[in-house]
RNA sequence: UGCUCCGUGGUGUAAUUGGCAACACGUCUGACUCUGGAUCAGAAAAGUUCAGGUUCGAGCCCUGACGGAGCAACCA
């Protein structure tokens, strides 16, 4: 028992909560908290996004505010509606809602245009006729200041005329851009007259061909925040250097005391995987994995298919916290989170991955008993089920050894084990084939030791799971392991992460035998295969050919000892 | 060699804002168990990157090193 005084310390707050509470205490923005989650619809969400989603929606919820969903769709060449639906599905699956606040940066193209025009009129933006290459050369380097463009001092009238004509399609892509007129000598590269509009003639998935010029990220994001009344714009660390520009635009835009504030936190990295959209896309395109929802992918749809629950992902995100340190989180913590969740929730069943036939020689032929077995020892409310038992059963190949070491508590010649929920059996012999493989084990059972029976309490070292040979169902089981064998596959300079691909990341096991209660298991149903791990029914599963994905193994101290 | 940010057990985070470095995962013991799971009890593991300074007192403040990350897309 813990003494009360040991547990009085309140939960500590992370730096973003502290910042928000400080803003609140200073009465900023009328005491409102309003956040946004701003995905670009150019790919699927991964667990790193989950970290951002939990923060954006979580802070709004905690401080009685709202969180908008806003698609950052400023680049029609890369984005597509295809992704919009999957992004929405994944956010909802995680358990968050944006209610009716589904917005798009493209909703603001008109207002952004007007703002750009206003900057031109104030002498704060100009059209540059130079090529991308020339502009880039003039930008200088982080250690050398840039040079001013020869077009930097055009007249307002000329700038306005050119900007309008850019949008009418008069000029080719790449021939002209609109730049903010800030400071080519700034130590911050982003302040060196950043490009804010470029000509793009690809139709936009929402605005069609209305626009021929599109705003850049820096010219869209902060302003969209402003238009929506966002108070706290939370993003990852790499945008830290953009903040002065974010603030600069807000300064030009604001008309009263309201202003959104950008705060940056650390991105999620996981051991033994890659997280960048680009690298994940490569894995998909090159067929290294079966798709975005391959159960080995750190995408939300992949994790879902693997058998992860939204609760476990939120729990994991909660455990890792938010800081400004670039960290790499151990997958074992994610695995802990899903085990913890499924331990309480997943019904237990018997599934034998690599069947070995056991014949109980003194058990009556053709006899069948229905054994009543608890569904979840952690949760009495899940009730009990009947599992048929008969003379011929299957057990796990690994659960028999001809010449076992000392601490092997399972089946071996002369040894006794408990069949979970049934009888204690004793091994009396076994049969080998020409290759020396054990193909059949012979046992006798003790009728007095049936669960609940008079001798049921007799102590035996081991307990095995089993299925009745004739009653069991055939199944395919997909065993997943980490996709990469290196802890930080993208952390090596000059080495392609794919050098570290784990060839054993997927093992397909066919001919597994599972108990008959699984006959009508549906995709996404989750079970604990007793003594083995947690499994989830795959989308490929059919009533007559079941397919299970292994979400995560049970902890296995026996396997660990034998490493 | 510019600017910005970051350095706390193996990993991720805490430290009531200057008061004996705590928690979780992982690791290792042991107990219990009709899951070698779960549960329970316990252990090892950092003296806070380094060097100065301020202070009665520094992981927190100051100075300087060292180390790491980001920034030079008409990407976000």
Image (cartoon, coloured by chain):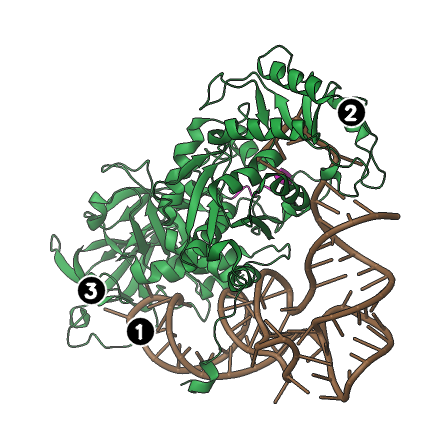
Chain colours: A green, B brown
Circle 3 SS class: helix
A501 in magenta:
yes
Query: Which residue does the numbered mark 3 point to in the structure image?
Result: A381
Query: Which residue does the numbered mark 2 point to in the structure image?
Result: A153
Left or right: where A454 falls relative to B40 = left
The reply to whether callout 1 and callout 3 are in contact (CB within 8 Å) is no
Residue visible at 73% across and 38% down in the picture: A191
Chain letter for mark 3: A
A94 in magenta:
no
Name the N-terminal-most of marks 3 and 2: 2
The answer to which image quadrant residue A169 occupies is top right
- Give the quadrant of the N terminus of chain A: bottom left
Tag in front: 3 or 2 = 2
Identify which residue, A67 or A382, lies in the foreground.
A67
Query: Which residue does the numbered mark 1 point to in the structure image?
Result: A460
Identify which residue, A95 or A408, lies in the foreground.
A95
Local packing at callout 3 (Cα closer than 10 Å; few below 14, some 14-19, many 20+) is few
Residue A213 position within the rendered picture, expressed as x and y whole percent measured from the top left: 58, 21
Residue visible at 63% across and 57% down in the picture: A324
Quote the CA–CA distance across marks 1 and 3: 28 Å
Quote the CA–CA distance across marks 3 and 2: 76 Å
The answer to which image quadrant residue A122 occupies is top right
Numbered label tally: 3
Circle 2 SS class: loop
Identify which residue, A545 or A346, lies in the foreground.
A346
């Amino acid at each position: 028992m813990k003494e009360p005084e040991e547990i009085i310390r309140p939960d500590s707050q992370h730096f973003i909560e502290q910042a928000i509470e400080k803003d609140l205490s200073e009465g900023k923005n009328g005491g409102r908290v309003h956040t946004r989650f701003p995905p670009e619809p150019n790919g699927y969400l991964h667990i790193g996004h989950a970290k951002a989603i939990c923060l954006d929606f979580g802070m709004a919820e905690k401080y009685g505010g709202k969180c908008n969903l806003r698609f950052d769709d400023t680049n029609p060449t890369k984005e597509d509606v295809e992704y919009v639906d999957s992004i929405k599905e994944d956010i909802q699956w995680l358990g968050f809602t944006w209610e009716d606040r589904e917005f798009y940066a493209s909703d603001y193209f008109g207002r952004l245009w007007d703002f750009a025009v206003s900057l031109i009129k104030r002498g704060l933006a100009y059209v540059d006729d130079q090529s991308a290459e020339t502009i880039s050369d003039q930008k200088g380097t982080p250690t050398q200041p840039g040079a001013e463009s020869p077009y930097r001092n055009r007249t307002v009238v000329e700038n306005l005329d050119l900007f309008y004509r850019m949008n009418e399609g008069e000029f080719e892509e790449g021939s002209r851009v609109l730049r903010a007129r800030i400071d080519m000598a700034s130590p911050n590269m982003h302040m060196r007259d950043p490009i804010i509009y470029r000509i793009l003639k690809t139709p936009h998935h929402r605005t069609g061909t209305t626009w021929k010029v599109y705003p850049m990220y820096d010219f869209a994001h902060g302003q969209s925040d402003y238009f929506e009344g966002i108070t706290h714009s939370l993003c990852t660390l790499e945008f830290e250097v953009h903040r002065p520009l974010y603030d600069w635009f807000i300064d030009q835009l604001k008309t009263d005391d309201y202003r959104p504030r950008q705060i940056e936190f650390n991105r999620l990295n996981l051991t033994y995987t890659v997280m960048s959209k680009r690298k994940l896309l490569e894995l998909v395109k090159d067929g290294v994995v079966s798709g975005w929802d391959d159960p080995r992918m750190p995408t939300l749809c992949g994790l879902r298919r693997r058998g992860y629950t939204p609760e476990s992902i939120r729990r994991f995100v909660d455990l890792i916290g938010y800081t400004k340190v670039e960290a790499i989180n151990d997958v074992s913590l994610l695995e802990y989170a899903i085990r913890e969740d499924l331990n309480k929730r997943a019904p237990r069943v018997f599934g034998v991955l690599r069947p070995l036939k056991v014949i109980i020689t003194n058990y009556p032929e053709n006899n069948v008993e229905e054994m009543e077995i608890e569904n979840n020892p952690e949760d009495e409310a899940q009730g009990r089920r009947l599992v048929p038992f008969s003379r011929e059963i299957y057990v796990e190949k690994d659960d028999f050894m001809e010449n076992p070491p000392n601490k092997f508590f399972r089946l071996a010649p002369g040894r006794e084990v408990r069949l979970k929920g049934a009888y204690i059996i004793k091994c009396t012999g076994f049969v080998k084939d020409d290759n020396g493989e054990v193909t059949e084990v012979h046992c006798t059972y003790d009728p007095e030791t049936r669960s609940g029976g008079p001798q049921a309490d007799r102590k035996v070292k081991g307990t095995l799971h089993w299925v009745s040979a004739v009653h069991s169902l055939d199944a395919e089981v997909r065993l997943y392991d980490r996709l990469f064998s290196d802890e930080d596959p993208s952390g090596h300079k000059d080495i392609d992460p794919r050098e570290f691909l784990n060839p054993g990341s997927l093992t397909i096991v066919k001919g597994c035998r599972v108990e008959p209660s699984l006959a009508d298991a549906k995709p996404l149903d989750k079970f604990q295969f007793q003594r083995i791990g947690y499994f989830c029914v795959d989308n490929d599963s059919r009533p007559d050919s079941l397919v299970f994905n292994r979400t995560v193994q049970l902890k296995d101290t026996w396997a660990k000892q034998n490493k």
